[in-house]
Amino acid sequence: MIGVGVASALLPVVGLGIVHAVGFLPAGIAAGSVAAKLMSVSAIANGGGVVAGGAVATLQSVGTCVVGFTTSALSGLLGSTAAASVIAVKSNLEDGKKSDSKL
């Protein structure tokens, strides 16, 4: 369960890092990047503009996020701990029902 918590805590940070690495940055799309190419392809395919709510627009919105590592890690850890707790309680309840049915 600890591994799931650590992975969940790091996922937002790693995901944001990947989005930034391809060129979707807080200041905008980086010139000459993969993001710039995607924006160009999207604009050509849609008659000169990028579709609101499309993949490029969504990735740009994500790229503008500047989330601190501590905040991301803490929120991921808390969320995954809550999910693991719910799973454990449900599992214990189901095990209790199985024990009662054997009596």
Image (tube, rainbow, N blue to C red):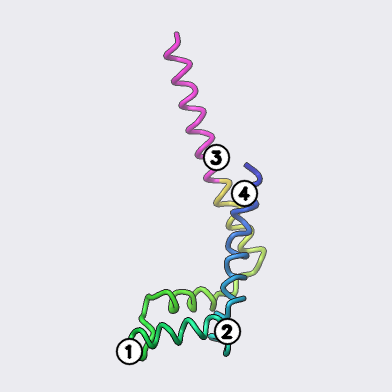
Disc 3 versus disc 4: nearer the observer? 4
> Which residue does the numbered mark 2 point to in the structure image?
33
Q: Nearer the viewer, residue 20 or 42?
A: 42
**Residue stretch in magenta:** 82-103
Residue at the spot of label 3: 85
- The residue sitting at 48% across, 75% down in the picture is 59
Task: Return the residue nearer the eye: 31 or 12.
Answer: 31
Magenta highlight on residue 90: yes
In the depicted structure, whether residue 66 falls above or below residue 1: below
Cα–Cα gap, marks 4 and 2: 33 Å
Distance of label 1 from label 3 (alpha carbons): 50 Å
Element class at badge 3: helix
Q: Say above or below: 7 vs 72.
A: above
Which class describes the residues within 10 Å of circle 2: few (<14), some (14-19), or many (20+)? some
Tell which circle, 1 or 3, labels the residue nearer the N-terminal end.
1
In the picture of the structure, the residue carrying the numbered disc 4 is: 5
Dot 4 or dot 1, earlier in sequence: 4
Which tag is nearer the camera, tag 4 or tag 1? 1
Which residue is found at the position 58% from the left and 66% from the top?
A: 15
* Residue at 57% over, 81% down: 23
The x and y percentages for residue 9 are 62, 56
Identified by mark 4, the residue type is Gly
Q: State if disc 4 and disc 3 touch (CB < 8 Å).
A: no
The residue singled out by tag 1 in the image is: 47
The mark that comes first in sequence, 1 or 2, is 2
Compute the Cα span from label 3 to label 4: 11 Å
Could you tell me which secondary element the residue under label 1 belongs to?
loop
Q: Are marks 4 and 2 in contact (CB under 8 Å)?
A: no
Circle 1 packing at 10 Å, graded few (<14), some (14-19), many (20+), is: few
Quarter of the figure that contains the C terminus = top left
